[in-house]
Amino acid sequence: FKLHLDTDLRHENLNLNYHHYSLGFHYLFLEKWSFGLFYRTSFKLKKNNWTTEHRYYYQIERKGKLPLIKWRIRDRIEIRNQNRYSIRNRIRFLLTTSHPLLKITPFMGNEFFINMSDKSYSKNWFFIGIKLPESWIFRPSIYYKNTNTKKNGTWSSPNHMITFKINI
């Protein structure tokens, strides 16, 4: 049993435009499986107004190891409330090296987003990066993320982002 606390602050042009706070727990079972229940409140700046979303989600994850790589598959179901309720399924594949070089761990993954109301594939994240050596209680990582979003049946131009993240 592990407690999960998470916060995320995002900036665009040095202005805060998104932040969220999460609370939940993971339960590890059968050595390579985990199940979790979570709650998240997020705030997003849209047209100079802050919008709020309340999100409840559960996920199940399976991890494994091959001689050169570790892998994880996660399936997450989200119940989202943004002035109306919606349900979304997120499926993530993640690969990391089994043997870090100089305590630096390369990783890459992909996450598919499916709106359950119309069973449509609506978003895709591809990411690739490195986890840096742990210092004190922090584990920083830096990665490139390519996001594609489908709205009204049409895929938008990809959004490219470099992210610096600190896990505690």
Image (cartoon, grey):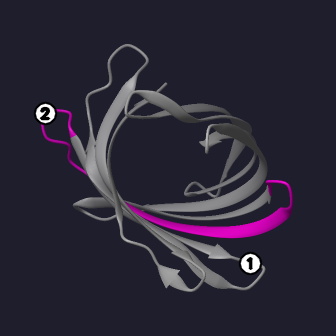
The amino acid on which the numbered mark 2 sits, given as a three-letter code, is Leu
Q: Name the residue located 64 percent from the left edge and 58 percent from the top edge.
A: 30
The amino acid on which the numbered mark 1 sits, given as a three-letter code, is Met
Q: Is residue 99 magenta?
A: yes
Q: Is residue 165 magenta?
A: no
Q: Name the residue located 26 percent from the left edge and 28 percent from the top edge.
A: 133
Observer-nearest of 11 and 123: 11
Horizontal arrangement in the rendering, residue 57 relative to residue 140 (left or right): right
In the image, farthest residue toward the top: 136
Determine the secondary structure under disc 1: loop
What residue is disc 2 on?
102
Residue 57 visible in the shown view: yes
Observer-nearest of 30 and 111: 111
Quarter of the view holding residue 115: bottom right
Horizontal arrangement in the rendering, residue 32 relative to residue 105 (left or right): right
Pair 1/2: label in front: 1
Q: Name the residue located 55 percent from the left edge and 57 percent from the top edge.
A: 32
As drawn, the label of residue 116 is 1
Horizontal arrangement in the rendering, residue 139 relative to residue 38 (left or right): left
Identify the magenta region: 81-104
Question: Is disc 2 surrounded by few (<14), some (14 to 19) or many (20+) residues within 10 Å?
Answer: few
Observer-nearest of 101 and 119: 119
In the image, farthest residue toward the left: 102
How far is disc 1 from disc 2 in space, using C-alphas? 43 Å
Vertical arrangement, residue 54 with respect to residue 124, above or below: above
